[in-house]
Amino acid sequence: MIRFDNVTKTYMRGQHPAVENLDIEFSRGEFVFLVGASGSGKSTMMRMVLKEVAPTRGTVYVAGRDLSRIPSWRVPALRRDIGMVFQDFRLLPSKTAYQNIEFALAVIGTPRKVVRRLVPEMLEMVGLEDKGKRLPHELSGGEQQRVAIARAYVNRPTILLADEPTGNLDPSTAEGILELLSEINERGTTVVMATHDQSAVDRMRRRVVEMVGGKVVRDEQDGRYETEGALSVISGNLPDDSAHREEHPLDDVESRDGSGAGQDVSAREDEPASDVLEEELIDEREARLAQEEDAFSEDEDEEGLR
Ligand SMILES: Nc1ncnc2c1ncn2[C@@H]1O[C@H](COP(=O)(O)OP(=O)(O)OP(=O)(O)O)[C@@H](O)[C@H]1O
Ligand SMILES: [Mg+2]
């Protein structure tokens, strides 16, 4: 679904690469946590998937499609099918919470009846049913982030990229959001979430990809926020101690755990290597939307009979 093929991104000449020689793949339907210290390259990875940032070297594929070959006029279509929650919300400042969510549906031509049903449902799901009329500046940071999550999900995207979606939420709200993301994932959306939320990662036990200085140093199924080694206070192996992380290169993880990263990355032969048209993404999303619409139209028929 998403593949980085030897990708390096250097923002400024002479600067240490934000992401370096990245070779990793996220499969259709997976839920992946990206963890790592501030500046380790997590947001850069997501921005490359959105084609907001171009790799300096290497290739990023989404649904088998080399993003560098997608012409600029097709980029909006690509982005419409990738839900994104940003660290800094990026809500439309002159639109209410309701309108921000509504907007994401309107631009893809969703029928008005479905919009009227889905938007309140989304607001309720993120706990803001009574705040739909507020403008972003009238909401707390945490509330704005919840609107952003609702907006990213309402389109039923094939891929959802979430950059610290729980960063501004209180623990119980964060838990609710994680449940929502999990539900989104269960419905077939590939979810990639960058996070510093240790409890979320440890609770969910999903694939964990850890970045240090732009490189993947750990890739585990059913992973935790930190390796057992990193958790050991006795060994002095502190979470953000990159010197110690050097002692746990990926090879080491693989040799300790045969079900770990190495197999993950190589066991993707079932997926077609050749180009799959990006339409496939759109088709998938539309099929999901159609299902939703069917569900709603049943209700609407009932309403019609009353
Ligand atoms: N637009 C930019 N121009 C120059 N350097 C950048 C730019 N964006 C990011 N960087 C640098 O690239 C590196 C990776 O940044 P990135 O934002 O990907 O990290 P991150 O893992 O998302 O961090 P955080 O957890 O703080 O969000 C950092 O050293 C950062 O300073
Ligand atoms: Mg970031």
Image (spheres, rainbow, N blue to C red):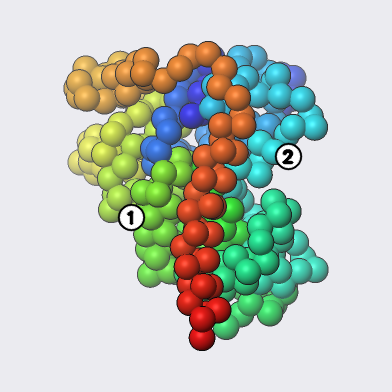
Q: Position of residue 75 (x, y in %)?
A: 73, 34
Q: Indicate left or right for 156 with 92 as reference.
A: left
Tag nearer the camera, 1 or 2: 2
Closer to the camera, 69 or 219?
69
Closer to the camera, 189 or 90?
189
Task: Spot the residue most to the front.
Answer: 305
Kind of residue indicated by mark 2? Pro
Q: Position of residue 28 (x, y in %)?
A: 43, 33
Residue 173 vertical placement versus 223 (above, below): below
Q: Which residue is mark 2?
A: 76
Q: Which residue is mark 1?
A: 199
- Please name the residue shown 58% across and 53% down the image: 155
Check disc 1 and report its element: helix, strand or loop.
helix
Q: Position of residue 50 (x, y in %)?
A: 64, 36
Residue 131 vertical placement versus 116 (above, below): below
- Please name the residue shown 79% across and 29% down the image: 72
Closer to the camera, 248 or 146?
146
* Residue 8 can be seen in this image: no
Estimate how packed mark 2 is, as few (under 14), some (14 to 19) or many (20 or more) residues with alpha carbons within 10 Å: few
